[in-house]
Image (tube, rainbow, N blue to C red):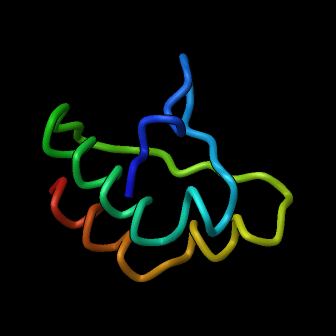
Amino acid sequence: MDLSRSFKAYDVRGRIPDELNPDAVYRIGRAYAAWLKPKRIAVGRDIRLSSEEIAKAPYLDTILISLD
């Protein structure tokens, strides 16, 4: 999956599920955590129905746990 078109100056954007899907979000989150090694991260979302699926996905716990 080519994510190069999804990265913008200040955020990540894409069409669900063609350009952004749970697997893509997992890979982006893991790379972010590995590269910056933050102590905490915030997960934001908007009103779209697809946002809940992405924000509440079980794989997100794996990324958050790896930060501790």
Q: Quick check: 21 above or below 15?
A: below
In-front residue for pair 8/51? 8
Please state, as top left, top right, bottom left or bottom right, where the C terminus lies in the image: bottom left
Q: Position of residue 12 (x, y in %)?
A: 55, 38
> Residue at (84%, 62%) from the top-left corner?
48
Residue situated furthest bottom in the rendering:
58
Between 20 and 60, the one nearer to me in the picture: 20
Residue under the image location 23 percent in, 41 percent down: 39
Among the 4 quarters of the image, the one containing residue 64: bottom left
Say which quarter of the image contains residue 61.
bottom left
In the displayed structure, does residue 7 sit left or right of residue 37?
right
Nearer to us in this view, 63 or 12: 12
The N terminus lies in quadrant: bottom left
Residue 26: x, y in percent?
35, 64
Left or right of residue 44: residue 6: left
Number of labels in the image equals: 0
**Outermost residue, front side:** 2
Residue 56 position, x and y percent, is 56, 75
- In this rendering, the answer to whether 40 lies above or below 19 is above
At a point 57% along the width and 69% down the height, the residue shown is 54
Q: Decide if residue 1 is on the left or right side of residue 6.
A: left
Q: Residue at x 15, y 35 (%)?
A: 35
Up the image or down, 18 lies above or below 37; here it is: below
